[in-house]
Amino acid sequence: MTKNQIFSRPLHRPSKPEGGLVSDRVADRILARIASGEWGLGHRLPGERQLAEEMAVSRVSVRAALQGLKTQGFLDAVQGGGTRVIASTSTMEPGLVELVRVNPENLHDLAEIRCNLEIWAARRAALNATDSHIDELAAILVAAEADMADAKHKTEHDLRFHLAVAKASGSGVYMHIVGYIRGILEETVAFHRYELFPTAEDDQSILAQHRAIFDGIRRRDPEAAAAAVQVHLGWVVQVLSDERERRRSETA
């Protein structure tokens, strides 16, 4: 993926799934769990019967909701039966994407805002994370390290880690914000991991930075977790700042 490709993709606003008001509500509840990071990329959803029982609706409504979300590109059928979450640019907020597409310098502002938000989230996660949240973060780091030699799934592991920190914050407001920007977050993470910081040494540095964030959360140390995020995302902000200054000096 090149930088130009990131900013030249056509924008699509997802349409509401068909099937009536009940299936719309079911779809919204499924999307909320995807946006919060509870059901990350590749996650296999429970079966129709289980979803229907959990949501107290009919299997017909669940089936209509799932079909609508497949059509929109949020879900995909699994061979042998079932449904899984897939990556999709249709989750992007078009206005925000357009701002970045027409002026790549806005990547810097996005990274800076994200850094400040995630510093807050890491502090909250250190205070609110449950044992289940800690276990999830640890499992993501293990998976990322296992795939590192082959440079596989870098975007997926990175995104899952940050979404898991968001979930561990325990803030519904913050998870809603993350859900709103999830699409462009996925695109920028892919750009960071494969274009901005593509080397094996970069991968090792990023894993170490993620471990430092995790360690602060695991030790229930809000300031350590926040400082680790500052190091991690501050690195991105600095590289983008340098690039912005270089561009400005060339046009001066």
Image (tube, grey):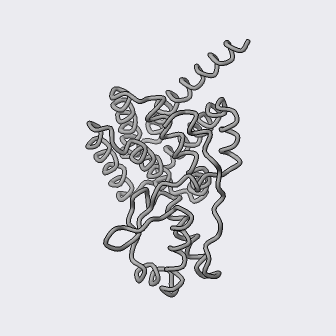
Q: Quadrant of residue 155?
A: top left
Which residue: 55% across, 33% down? 3
Residue found farthest to the right? 252
Q: Quadrant of the C terminus?
A: top right
| For residue 172, above or below residue 109 | below
Q: Decide which of 215, 28 is in the foreground and name it.
A: 28
Which residue: 66% across, 58% down? 13
Total marks placed: 0
Residue 109 x %, y %: 65, 33
Q: Decide which of 73, 56 is in the foreground and name it.
A: 73
Residue 149 x %, y %: 26, 36
| For residue 219, above or below residue 192 | below
| For residue 134, above or below residue 18 | above
Judged left or right of residue 120, residue 86 is: left
Judged left or right of residue 75, residue 8 is: right
Which residue: 57% across, 26% down? 240
Which residue: 31% across, 51% down? 139
Q: Decide which of 181, 125 is in the foreground and name it.
A: 181
Residue 181 x %, y %: 60, 50
Q: Quadrant of residue 217?
A: top left
Judged left or right of residue 9, residue 134 is: left
Residue 248 x %, y %: 69, 17
